[in-house]
Amino acid sequence: MEKFDIAVEGMMCKMCAKHVEEAALSVDGVKKAKVSLDDKKVTVTADENVDKAAIVAKINQAGYKA
């Protein structure tokens, strides 16, 4: 398992955080996603071989800029 942060722009409320977390969790290998609205990032816990570009793409598809 590895843990890493992805900066995300455009989140302003708890609903935004939920959308970003759901987007990250939709990628195979992602076990946990926790958003910090104050820090404008999502902390992801995932398998070591997870496709980070896929996580970024899913967040962008959700309407936020990762």
Image: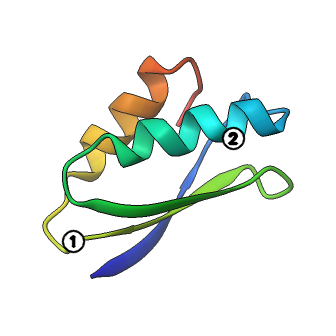
Q: Is residue 34 above or below residue 57?
A: below
Where residue 8 appears, as percent x and y from the top left, is 62, 41
Amino acid type of the residue tagged 2 in the rendering: Ala
Residue for badge 2: 17
Mark 1 crowd level (few <14, some 14–19, many ≥20, 10 Å Cα): some
Residue drawn at x 52%, y 37% is: 66
Residue found farthest to the left:
49
31 on left or right of 13: left
In front of the other: 18 or 56: 18
Q: Quadrant of residue 15?
A: top right
Residue labelled with disc 1: 47
- Amino acid identity at mark 1: Asp
Q: Residue at x 19, y 50 (%)?
A: 28
Of all residues, the one furthest to the bottom in this rendering is 1
- The x and y percentages for residue 25 are 38, 48
* Tag 1 near tag 2, CB within 8 Å: no
Q: Position of residue 19 (x, y in %)?
A: 58, 32
Query: Who comes first in sequence, dot 1 or dot 2?
Result: 2
